Image: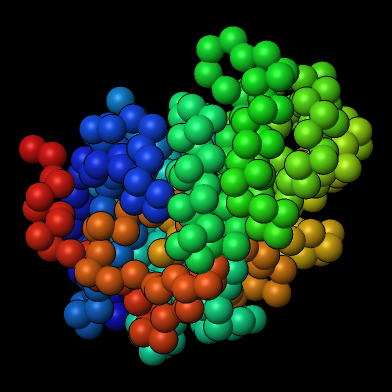
């Protein structure tokens, strides 16, 4: 079996928020690159990538260029293909457009591998559990008012989510009181039993994180996420040492090595891996294994339709971020009920691109 051909689409999809119907930026769009790789045996593997922003056309072209290089190669050898792509790229990895492009290819190769084996990815990679916890994300964003955020949180609870994530580091020039008020308003709206996470998106300095983090410890956050600059491992470790609230981080890290630095610095309690910034499934698994060796749980970042299978495969998978950015691109996605995702039994990712959606969202 060889890689025979591929199709690569640049899309623009709505940046809506269906979970609580409270979008932060109504009408905003998100660029996505959707890849399909077909083998000589007629197996099609799918992958996607994003984070290109204004460089999304360049990302689309990078996916084209790299996938062209592997025509005729064995799709069941993702490590060999990854090495070939790194060599061809002339040392421009481990971050940026190369890694984003390589991720789409790697996702498609693992889809082919699963379909060839007749197994879903979660069983192919270990099969630790058939259902995984998930938390609602993307609805409780910092651009909402306190009342809007509290209303959205109550809607998430009513819909059956038992875990959800809010954001602090509010826009403008918020006071410490503003930040505390937001956290307490959401906790009041959902009660004491819901797991409530909080994302800072690197917007606090270490001393802010320690100060505000201590003041909101009574809110009972399950974790504080990306509390300061993602590569300030010493600063994050200082925050972690100062707070009772666990610290999550890793979504902004590229490839494998920075995760080692974060883990060795004891900066994080929960290792968050972004499948696209990691470079695909192949490096994702290496990061997850490293976290397991340090007795640390792994949590995912976005694209739950892919990540649920990886979190379900590994022994230290904790929970899946349910941020439904891309769900409209597929004919069907794994079901969510009672705060959990039931993993698919179909081979590979168990996903099929919706052709009508691709045509509708395709950029010229």
Residue 267 to residue 324: above or below: above
Q: Is residue 337 left or right of residue 330?
A: right
Residue ID at (82%, 40%)? 218
Residue 363: where, in percent of width, then height?
A: 13, 39
Of all residues, the one furthest to the top in this rendering is 173
Q: Residue furthest bottom?
A: 118
> From the image, which quarter does the C terminus lie in?
top left
Q: Quadrant of residue 348?
A: bottom left
- Residue at image position (85%, 31%) is 214
User: Which quarter of the picture shows residue 328?
Assistant: bottom left
Task: Please indicate whether residue 19 sits to the left or right of residue 298 in the image.
Answer: left
Please name whichever residue, 296 or 333, is drawn nearer the observer in this view of the structure: 333
Residue 32 in view in this figure: yes
Residue sitting at x 48%, y 27%: 145
The image quadrant where one finds the N terminus is bottom left
Q: Residue at x 9, y 53 (%)?
A: 359
Q: Nearer the viewer, residue 250 or 141?
A: 141
Horizontal side, residue 101 vs residue 360: left or right: right
Residue in front for this viewpoint, 338 or 295: 338
Give the residue furthest to the right.
241
- Horizontal arrangement in the rendering, residue 22 relative to residue 225 (left or right): left
24 is higher (above) or lower (below) than 114: above
Q: Is residue 37 visible?
A: no
Give percent across and percent down for residue 112.
Answer: 35, 75
Residue 2 screen position, x and y as percent? 28, 74
Q: Total marks drawn?
A: 0
Residue 39: horizontal and vertical position, in percent?
Answer: 24, 74
């Amino acid at each position: 079996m060889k890689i025979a051909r591929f199709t690569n689409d640049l899309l623009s999809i709505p940046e809506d928020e269906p979970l609580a119907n409270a979008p932060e930026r109504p009408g905003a769009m998100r660029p996505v690159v959707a890849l399909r790789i077909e083998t000589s045996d007629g197996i099609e593997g799918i992958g996607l990538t994003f984070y290109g922003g204004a460089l999304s056309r360049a990302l689309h072209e990078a996916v084209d260029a790299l996938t062209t290089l592997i025509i005729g190669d064995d799709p069941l050898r993702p490590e060999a293909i990854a090495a070939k792509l790194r060599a061809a790229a002339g040392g421009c990895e481990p971050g940026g457009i190369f890694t984003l492009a390589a991720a789409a290819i790697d996702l498609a190769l693992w889809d082919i591998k699963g379909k060839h084996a007749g197994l879903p990815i979660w069983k192919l990679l270990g099969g630790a559990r058939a259902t995984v916890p998930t938390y609602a994300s993307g609805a409780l964003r910092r651009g909402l008012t306190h009342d809007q955020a509290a209303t959205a949180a109550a809607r998430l609870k009513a819909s059956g989510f038992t875990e959800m994530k809010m954001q602090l580091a509010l826009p403008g020039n918020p006071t410490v009181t503003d930040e505390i008020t937001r956290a307490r308003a959401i906790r009041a709206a959902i009660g004491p039993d819901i797991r409530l996470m909080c994302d800072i998106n690197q917007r606090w300095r270490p001393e802010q994180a320690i100060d505000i983090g201590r003041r909101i410890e009574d809110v009972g956050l399950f974790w504080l996420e990306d509390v300061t600059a993602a590569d300030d491992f010493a600063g994050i470790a200082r925050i972690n040492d100062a707070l009772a609230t666990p610290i999550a981080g890793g979504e902004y890290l590229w490839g494998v090595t920075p995760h080692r630095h974060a883990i060795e610095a004891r900066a994080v309690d929960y290792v968050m891996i972004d499948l696209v910034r990691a470079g695909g499934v192949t490096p994702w698994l290496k990061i997850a294994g490293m976290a397991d060796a340090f007795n640390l749980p792994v949590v995912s970042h976005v694209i739950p339709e892919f990540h649920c299978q990886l979190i379900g495969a590994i022994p230290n998978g904790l929970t899946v971020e349910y941020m439904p950015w891309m769900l409209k691109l597929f004919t069907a996605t794994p079901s969510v009920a009672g705060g959990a995702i039931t993993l698919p039994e179909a081979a590979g990712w168990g996903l099929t691109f919706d052709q009508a959606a691709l045509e509708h969202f395709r950029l010229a």
